[in-house]
Image (cartoon, grey):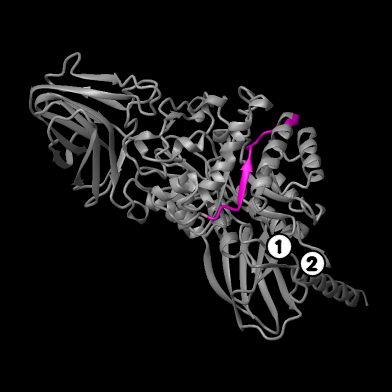
């Protein structure tokens, strides 16, 4: 009898273990919920970490127009005959001038090695074997007779490619001329070397070098490999130009979109506020040339099928820095900039700013629908200025939705003031930011469960799990941070009736010139790789769906029970059910997923897994796909899927109806 009781207990315990290990997740296909906006998953771009100059803007020459505080920064003049005065920095003394400085080169019977200039680029120039590079320069000859020998050199001075530029005759007017050269080898840290031959005096400005393989092969365009990473995500929107760049350290350094359009030589360079922000990562050669300006941002959004989301200064500089504001009675020019931007983006060619866009090469409108007023601003001073902007924009363009700031943190007195006031004022969209540890992201998968379904929507405009702490240079894009974001994002999708947009930040980082970690995509002079966090973002974006479906465990949404996080949706375009499941534990989880309320389904489902047993694992230039999606097929039996989710895994299942 005793032995029988032991057997019964053993069977019961085994049965309990089976129930525990084979818990049933139910997807209620016949109860579709909120629509998932096409803009749900997007990207946030800011010129931080050499994201623009030295990043997606493919210009290879640093300080090409000699406008840095130190006019020859990035350049080295020399040669056997080089003497004081042979290369002078001259100011045009024009008022106003967006491009005031140039250099004057005086050659006196110069030959090879006698008089030269070298530019090291943005921490070196990455050149590729057999690729063509296009050199150009603006010049005027005071005394003709000088030839320019253009060379690409490797780190030891070996010539990788060369060409000769022979300027036309003397002229008081600036001219532009170019030549091309092909590299005979691949080099990570090449430089541009110009040596002068002959006897004469020539003024030089806008000395430029671009690879031929830019995105869509546009002259003066963007780095194709970096833009490809974005295009592959198929983001619903791209937010630009930031970020704190919008605010500036003070208002003189704020981003002004009108100074970033038109001919590149007329765009006014300013210092980048990340030049001096962090003592632990000084970047004294970090400026904004605006070769990548608002026209190019709109064009990029169109290229990759994303909604443009520009953010404009609201008359407030960064409140962590100078906290400078414009008086309310002097805010009109700032408001007019916002109204003019809408006309630039959407107006026909007969309007003032629509004509400017058309003259730049885009007669059709960019179809701007959303814009932000202020970045990470807070307090009553922000609310006062926001009200003025909102009234002006809504009066003239009522169809434009406005993104409003909720400050720097997801909770506290600052957040409560903004969130409550904005909701009371029926704000279109409220932008929430959070840089927190992975535990916060796991714990906040239910953050939006109890937000009001009606009224203001949420834009999760900046977020990233910090492996150490915010602003720490030791932060890593490890698997724990990515997994916690995947878990948190189940709550964003589940609450698509509240959250209409979300974007990780920052987007890019130059491996040799970064200021902030972690970052979604890492870049060097020759290539780039996606972090585990990038693949999480990509999997959500590529598996967006059109309407949320309830997915439950014991009749509750799945947000941490048994270390599981889940969301589901239907894609009405492909007629598929999409299930996203995170196993945040170190143990394998065996679950069944039942599709309730459907007729027939395909006999197989696709399964994509992002997984590592090592929570500290990262991707790198040497191992760019150390953690990357792996795909397979799994059976579907009687509307039921058996899923054995690996430890520390993010699983995406697609089932055809």
* 630 is higher (above) or lower (below) than 126: below
Question: Which residue is identified by label 2?
Answer: 553
Whether residue 235 appears in magenta in the rendering, the answer is no
Residue 471 visible from this viewpoint: no
Taking the image as shown, residue 66 lies to the left or right of residue 599, namely: left
Q: Where is residue 50 in the image (x, y as percent from the top left)?
A: 44, 37
Instruction: Where is residue 423? Give x, y as percent.
Output: 79, 45
First to last magenta residue range: 367-380
Which of 173/264 is in front?
A: 173
Picture quadrant of residue 377:
top right
Q: Which residue lies furthest to the right in this view?
A: 1
Marks 1 & 2, CB-CB < 8 Å contact? yes
Q: In this view, does 605 lie to the left or right of 380?
A: left
Tag 2 secondary structure: strand
Few, some or many residues within 10 Å of mark 1 (<14, 14–19, 20+): many
Task: Give the class, few, some or many, for how many residues have Cα within 10 Å of label 2's Cα (few <14, many ≥20).
Answer: some
Classify residue 393 by image quadrant.
top right
**Residue nearer the viewer, 42 or 420:** 420
Mark 1 and mark 2 lie on one chain; the one further toward the N terminus is: 2
Residue drawn at x 67%, y 60% as measured from the top left: 582
Q: Quadrant of the N terminus?
A: bottom right
Q: Which of 383 and 55 is in front in this view?
A: 383
Q: Residue 487 carries which label?
A: none
> Label 1 to label 2, Cα distance in Å?
10 Å
Residue topped by disc 1: 566
Query: What secondary structure is marked by label 1?
Result: strand
Quarter of the image that includes the C terminus: bottom right
With 502 as the anchor, is 163 left or right in this view?
Answer: left
């Amino acid at each position: 009898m005793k032995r029988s009781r032991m057997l019964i207990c053993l069977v019961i315990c085994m049965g309990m273990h089976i129930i525990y290990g084979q818990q049933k997740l139910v997807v209620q296909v016949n109860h579709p919920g909120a629509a998932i906006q096409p803009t749900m998953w997007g990207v946030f771009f800011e010129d931080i970490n050499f994201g623009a100059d030295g990043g997606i803007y493919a210009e290879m020459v640093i300080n090409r127009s000699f406008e840095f505080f130190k006019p020859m920064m990035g350049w080295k003049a020399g040669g056997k005959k080089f003497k004081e005065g042979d290369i002078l920095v001259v100011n045009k003394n024009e008022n106003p001038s967006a491009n005031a400085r140039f250099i004057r080169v005086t050659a006196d019977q110069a030959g090879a090695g006698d008089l030269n200039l070298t530019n090291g680029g943005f921490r070196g120039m990455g050149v590729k074997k057999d690729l063509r590079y296009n050199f150009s320069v603006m010049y005027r000859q005071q005394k003709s007779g000088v030839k320019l020998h253009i060379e690409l050199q490797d780190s030891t001075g070996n010539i990788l490619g060369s060409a000769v530029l022979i300027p036309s005759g003397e002229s008081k007017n600036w001219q532009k001329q170019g030549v091309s050269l092909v590299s005979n080898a691949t080099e990570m840290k090449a430089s541009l070397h110009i040596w002068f031959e002959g006897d004469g005096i020539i003024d030089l400005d806008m000395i430029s070098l671009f690879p031929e393989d830019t995105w869509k092969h546009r002259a003066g365009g963007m780095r194709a490999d970096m833009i490809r990473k974005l295009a592959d995500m198929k983001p619903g929107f791209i937010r630009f130009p930031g970020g704190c760049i919008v605010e500036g350290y003070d208002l003189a350094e704020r981003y002004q979109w009108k100074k970033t359009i038109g001919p590149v030589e007329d765009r006014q360079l300013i210092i980048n506020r990340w030049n001096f922000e962090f003592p632990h990562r000084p970047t004294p050669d970090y400026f904004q040339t605006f070769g990548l300006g608002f026209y190019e941002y709109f064009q990029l959004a169109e290229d990759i099928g994303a909604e443009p989301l520009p953010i404009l200064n609201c008359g407030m500089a960064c409140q962590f820095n100078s906290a400078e504001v414009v008086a309310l009675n002097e805010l009109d020019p700032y408001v007019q900039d916002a109204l003019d931007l809408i006309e630039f983006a959407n107006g026909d060619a007969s309007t003032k700013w629509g004509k400017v866009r058309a003259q730049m090469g885009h007669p059709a409108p960019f179809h701007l629908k959303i814009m932000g007023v202020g970045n990470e601003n807070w307090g009553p001073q922000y609310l006062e200025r926001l009200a003025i902007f909102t009234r002006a924009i809504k009066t003239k363009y009522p169809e434009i939705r406005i993104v409003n700031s909720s400050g720097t943190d997801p909770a506290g007195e600052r957040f409560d003031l903004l969130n409550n006031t904005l909701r009371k004022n029926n704000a279109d969209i409220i932008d929430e930011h959070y840089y927190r540890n992975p535990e916060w992201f796991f714990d906040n998968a239910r953050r939006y469960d109890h937000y009001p379904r009606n009224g203001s929507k949420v834009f999760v405009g900046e977020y990233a799990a910090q492996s150490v702490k915010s602003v720490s240079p030791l932060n890593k894009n490890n698997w724990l941070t990515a997994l916690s974001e995947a878990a948190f994002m189940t709550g964003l999708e589940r609450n698509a009736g509240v959250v209409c947009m979300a974007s990780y930040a920052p987007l890019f980082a130059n491996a040799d010139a970064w200021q902030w970690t972690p970052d979604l995509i890492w870049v060097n002079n020759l290539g780039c790789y996606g972090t585990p966090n990038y693949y999480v973002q990509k999997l959500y974006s590529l598996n967006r769906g059109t309407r949320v479906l309830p997915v439950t465990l014991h009749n509750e949404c799945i947000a941490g029970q048994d270390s599981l996080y889940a969301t589901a949706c239907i894609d009405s375009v492909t007629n598929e059910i999409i299930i996203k499941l995170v196993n945040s534990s170190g143990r394998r989880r065996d679950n069944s997923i039942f599709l309730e309320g459907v007729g027939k389904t395909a006999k197989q489902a696709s399964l994509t897994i992002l997984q590592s047993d090592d929570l500290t694992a990262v991707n790198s230039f040497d191992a760019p796909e150390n953690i990357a999606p792996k795909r397979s097929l799994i059976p579907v039996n009687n509307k039921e899927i058996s899923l054995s989710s690996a430890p520390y895994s993010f699983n995406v299942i697609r089932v055809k109806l």
